[in-house]
Amino acid sequence: MQTVAVLSLKGGVGKTTVVLGLASAAMRRGVRTLVVDLDPQCNATSCLEPEETTKGLSDVLADPRPEVLREAVSGSSWGEEVDVLVGSEDAESHNGHHDEEHLARLTTALSELDGLIEDGELPYQLVLLDCPPSLGRLTRSALVAADRALLVTEPTIFAVSGVQRAFEAVQAERKSTNPKLQPLGVIVNRVRPRSHEHQFRIDELRDIFGPLVLPVALPDRLAVQQAQGACMPIHQWGTPGAREVALAFNLVLARTLRAGRQRRPDEDELEEDE
Ligand SMILES: Nc1ncnc2c1ncn2[C@@H]1O[C@H](COP(=O)(O)OP(=O)(O)O)[C@@H](O)[C@H]1O
Ligand SMILES: [Mg+2]
């Protein structure tokens, strides 16, 4: 099982879009996936339309026992490959506690996931943690639980400093609580390929972060908003723009799964570009 925290310093740059796009790509490949909605805005949960649950993320963080987890995880309307640990609007109330026991609760809960699998069901191969837009305790919980951190940015003038700070948070968590945590890379979202400004910003990111900037960027396409509005996987939206975005997500998913297979304890950076 590969657990990926999707984070950024700001809201609105595309974390949830990346989580949903990867879940959509995973579904297409038959990779069983759990989306964990850590954002109190619960956008990922809304888009995956789970059945009503009696518990949610904040209950799991208050009490990470398997029976609570079981009540908080639901199937999605997308298909049997994608489940969701539903978000809670009051998850913010957990954002204050920074002691290690609190930070480890998500990890504890996720370690019980295999116990949720019923006869004939596949185990989860991928867990996607959709983080809120701050480096508060919820995002730290995700970094404690994750194998990999995927940073999302837009190609703007503030991208470099934002990515730098997010990397520092990843490195700090790796040193203090989670030695297995590795950066998966930086994904640049909402790129307009003909924009010189965007190209300039991407080159700037590559100069500083080298191969950590993923070779595939996500184009800015209306189809992303349309598919989300209709609660549909981008792979099923079917317009030319949707196909372009879906293809990019296939490549990011392949890289994510490969990183899971190639993980080494002393690995310092992600693998060479192929
Ligand atoms: N590549 C894209 N093309 C078009 N719209 C996008 C793209 N990525 C994100 N958006 C839109 O931008 C808004 C914010 O994205 P979202 O993924 O919710 O950001 P975050 O989770 O970081 O707050 C959403 O309305 C989403 O549909
Ligand atoms: Mg979001």
Image: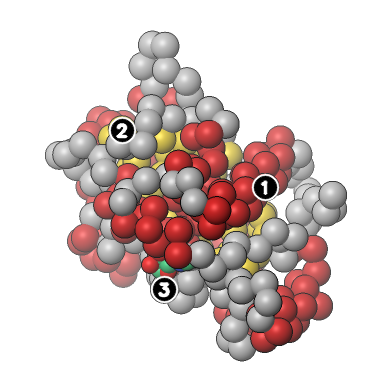
Which residue corresponds to the image point at 28% horizontal and 63% vertical from the top-left? 41
Q: Amino acid at mark 2?
A: Gly
Mark 2, residues whose alpha carbon is within 10 Å: few (<14), some, or many (≥20)?
some
Q: Secondary structure at mark 2?
A: strand
Q: CA distance from mark 3 to mark 1?
A: 24 Å
**Closer to the eye: label 2 or 1:** 1
Residue 75: mark: 2
Residue 198: mark: none
Left or right of 28? Residue 198 is right
Which residue corresponds to the image point at 31% horizontal and 51% vertical from the top-left? 230
State which tag comes first along the sequence, 2 or 1. Answer: 2
Cβ of mark 3 under 8 Å from ligand 1: the answer is yes
**Closer to the eye: label 3 or 1:** 1
State which tag comes first along the sequence, 3 or 1. Answer: 3
Residue 193: tell me if it is visible.
Answer: yes
Q: Is there a contact, CB below 8 Å, between mark 2 and mark 1?
A: no
Quadrant of residue 236 in the image? top left
Q: CA distance from mark 2 to mark 3?
A: 26 Å
Residue 143: tell me if it is visible.
Answer: no
Q: Secondary structure at mark 3?
A: loop
State which tag comes first along the sequence, 2 or 3. Answer: 3
Q: Which residue is mark 3?
A: 11
Q: Who is closer to the viewer here, 153 or 63?
A: 153
The quarter of the image holding the N terminus is: top right
Q: Which residue is mark 1?
A: 251
Q: Amino acid at mark 3?
A: Gly
